[in-house]
Amino acid sequence: MYALPPRYDFRRVEEEVARFWSENNIQKRHMEMNKGAPIFSFLEGPPTVNSYMHIGHARGRVYKDIVLRYQTMKGFDVWRRGGWDCQGLPVELEVEKKLNISSKKDIELIGMERFVEEAHRLVDYYIGEWRKGSERLGLWLDYDAAYQTRDEKYMEHVWHLLKKCYESGDLVVSFKVVPFCPRCETPLSSHEVAQGYEEVEDYSIYVKFPVEDDVKKCLVIWTTTPWTLAANEAVAVNPEEDYVELEVGKERLIIAEKLLESVCSNAGITGYRVVNRFTGGSLVGLKYIHPLGTEVGAHGSHQPPAHTVLPAEFVSMEEGTGLVHIAPGHGPEDFELGKRHGLPVFCPIGTNGVFTEEGGRFAGLSYREAAELVIKTLSEKGLLLKEGRVIHTYPHCWRCGTPLIYLTSRQWFLRIDRIKRLMIEENAKVKWYPVWAGQSRFGEWLENAEDWCISRTRVWGTPLNIWTCSKCGSTRAVGSKAELEEAEKKPTPIKMHRPWVDRVVFRCGKCGGEMYREPFVLDTWLDSGVAHFASVDWLRDKRLFERLFPYDFITEAIDQTRGWFYTLLFTSALMFGRAPYKTVLSQNFVLDKYGKKMSKSRGNVLWASDAMDNWGVDNVRLYLVSKAQSWETINFDPDEVKQINQALNILWNVVSFAKTYFDLDRYDPVKETVWAMLGYAEPEDRWILSRVNTLIRYVTSNIERFEMHEAARSLLNFIVEDLSRTYVRAVRRRFWIEERTPKKIAAYAALHYVLRKLLPVLSIFTPYISEYLYQRLKTVDDPISVCLVKWPRPDESLINPEIEDQMQVAEDVITATLNARNRARRKLRWPLRRIIISPNSPRAKSSVQALRSYIERMTNSFSVEVLEVGQKPSEVLRKLVPNPARLGPRAGKRLPLVSEALSRVRVGEVQDHVARSGRYSLVLGDGSIFEILDGDFQVVEELPSHLVEGEGRFVRVYIDVSEDERLRSLSLANEVIRRIQVMRKELNLEIVKEVPCVVSIEPQSVQESLKPLIEYIEEETRTRISLGLGRDFGGRVYKREWTLEQAALSVAMLLEEGKNE
RNA sequence: GGGCCCGUAGCUCAGCCUGGCUGGAGCGUCCGGCUGAUAACCGGAAGGUCGUGGGUUCGAAUCCCACCGGGCCCA
């Protein structure tokens, strides 16, 4: 027997269900249940396996799972191969940590072989952890066939793409200023840079550049990176703007007119005089003395236009001095300007951020150390106008947090110009959720996208497949592993990873020289970016790809707009000329309870496994989904997760309640279907049957629109409000009926139907508890697991908007009645003689009439009286009260007499008379007559003492609290029943067990009044009652005494007959 | 500096697209009740300048503009 434990314990549920799934191979059967049906293809964005799954990852994975389960249940053959992103800087950093090393030099020291082996081991470990965690979370992907970006078969797709681009001219090498992380010693792509902006405090210095012909005259520049001054080659001005020459003491300073005030206040210049004014254009060509010319000797050989003023449109009048220091080696814009004017590209800093020999006096210093020395030197030379600090946003390495520096270096790029328009057009065809994520955000990003720097000077990654001849410089691209076999020198066995691939040497086809591999590895975003064709091994067999591509659905967090969403589109545009996905669901992050970003340094990271341990998989899943739209951030608050647990506990209780009575009566859901029992259905049955079907329709349409939170909330609301609060409350008494009446079975059928419809829908959100409960309710005709059920379709024939409307009114009546009872201190178990309902509208009236008996039942009233719309009960007393403002002046001292007379006359008569003739002659107590006019009085309504009012949205309810003997004894009987039930409960008796009881009540007269109701009490409590008789049964007795409103009650319950005493 | 999202009760969120009944819900708090689903459940109450200021309109939480605050993305 599948009895339900008394409380919902998620640990127990998860354990049992997980065992059931694994023993019956449910995951595989679920994934294969629609083989051959139309395909729904999903492309898994591969998580980087450098660490454990945290709650943010879990959120994303829950959305994936919900969609995949839904599409599966809808009947699609869902493609859901897993995938793991195995390479790249993040993994390297983790390996470094494990090996306790921290730089590229250290890697060379321990040897690349060892490093790469360790990387493999680390990846193996985390893949295992991620799979375990994901499966526990319920995300059912095809993990056995999961793609791994480190596999040679996978990497060959990257090579294939690059070779194609090499041949088409889309892959180019060039010198460029790129952002470097000096700690990781590798350049970052723009989408990596985009992820690392942080607010920091930096130097803010104003520096004087003396003009060569007139050293008292200085150009003033502003910079936040003093160390780049060592590589200064020019000063740029905006030729269109006006500049001024200031006299400050003996010096003359040149700055932009528009920035005059801000510079003077920032640099603390007072007492100046404007002596000259000219356009920026007139400054062009002016030669200046390099402020660090003597310290950095290389500048001696730099010929004009080096160290002169150049025109540049980008010079802004928003900040700085209007004169911009130009270091072509250290700034992208500087580089471009330098290229236009033929400036030397001077870059005296290595990729590790340390000045080289070219750096002269700064050689051997890190850029940070150099910055201080630069400031000191300038200060000594009298060229430092002002040193300050500024807080601004500056890009940092997205993985290690080191501030980036811009350096010139030789890098490999994928050119965007050929495909840019195509990408924009293709993106417009993609369905984005929400729309703005695609149109505004991604669209804007695409408009501004630049060439993609794909080379990285690291170790653990897909190697760049370009070999260059050491003699003549010609290059070749290698497109596959097999091609490596053609090499002149090669290791055995050949491996595609570094360092082995570096040992492959080709013979140059042009000059016969030796060709060595370009020592780069590739941006890891390129690895995951080719997943659309690499994950299905396109190179070896294109058939699968052709069935899946473009993918129906992908979903990742919003940061992937610039990451994976972008690189997928980029490579797909290059390879196939179209977008690789049709629908993108954008998600957002999980923040901590206080809205703070979770980070290891802050120590507030919540690991998915801890969350699952603490609050349960189902609770966490439902919480994450129901809290907000997927594209909004959520603050994770454990207390709120517990609320979800409470709601699921209510569902548990409902099933437990149902199951108890189903078993008791051997209810047969196969024969006693809702269709068979429909003729015996009560209004509440027809209502819940309609509600559940309306719900399914609503949930389905919300899922289709990716309004998952709305779907989840409507489910929760249905469980708590409709199913538990309303329906179970309504059918409880029917369930308690002892005989197997059709009306009871009709309720069983309705409840069984509702649960059987509900659980599969719920299972995509909370698979564990849904499965657990499904197991207790499924019939022999049902699939073995809830995960193998088809998505329920609403039974349109059961949808009945009319009864849903009517019930809304009925519930309103019930609430209003309970409200009135509460005020009148009339407990629900004390029956009411009658309630009177005054409806607000014809619709409310007809609803009340239709559900009259339901309302009687639920309010414990003998009768329901329905008035006309807006009508008051006839017992409402109407009184005339004087309006003293009007009557006072006229009646004077007679006012009390008038008041008294008004209270005596018949209200209707006075009203009619006044309405007809405008006046009424009032006979006062002293016999005199007083004329009252319209407006002299008001009509006030007063309820008689036996009526108490309660107000609802649709009705006003008056309860009649007057009592008679019959009502009183019934109330008493109910009090007795309740006490006996408490005792049964305390003894934990079986529901069906019948026990003998002695009930005695003081005073005797009250006990007498109970006599006719003994049978009723016996029926309700499954007891055999002796009233006030002998105190001993001669067995073991449980006895309790109670004080009721009007009497003292004592109940003795016989436990075991005939056992001693 | 530019783009996008958000700002409604103590907390978490609906409502806004398509202007109109007294701006809702859950949780929390307080009061009361109920009790064979029971570490549940029900009723009631308190609690809101709908971020601020303008504008459009007979009417604005809702549409428009500006500003303030928070977040994200880009410079």
Image (spheres, helix red, strand yellow):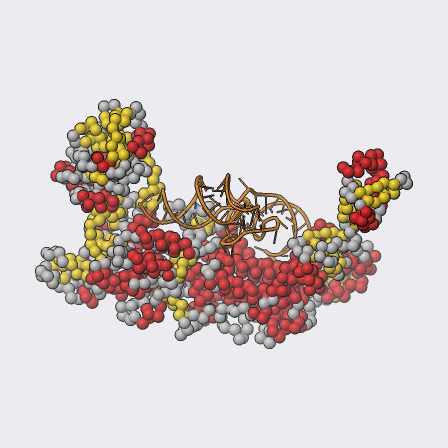
Point out the image quarter for the N terminus of chain A.
bottom right
The reply to whether residue A483 is visible in this rendering is: yes
**Whether residue A740 is situated above or below residue A714 in the rendered picture:** below
Give the farthest residue toward the front.
A917
Q: Nearer the viewer, residue A522 or A1021?
A: A522
Q: Residue at x 77, y 64 (%)?
A: A1014
Query: What residue is at 63 percent from the left and 64 percent from the top?
Result: A803
Quadrant of the rendering where the C terminus of chain A is positioned = bottom right
Query: Looking at the image, which residue sits at the far right?
Result: A927
Q: Position of residue A409 (x, y in %)?
A: 20, 48
The relative height of residue A738 versus residue B62 in the rendered view (above or below) is: below
Residue at 28% x, 25% y is A273
Q: Nearer the viewer, residue A1034 or B26?
A: B26
Q: Residue A810's image quarter?
A: bottom right
Q: Position of residue A13 (x, y in %)?
A: 50, 63
Q: Is residue A320 left or right of residue A904?
A: left
Q: Position of residue A338 (x, y in %)?
A: 20, 44
Apparent side of residue A552 relative to residue A1016 in the rendered image (left or right): left
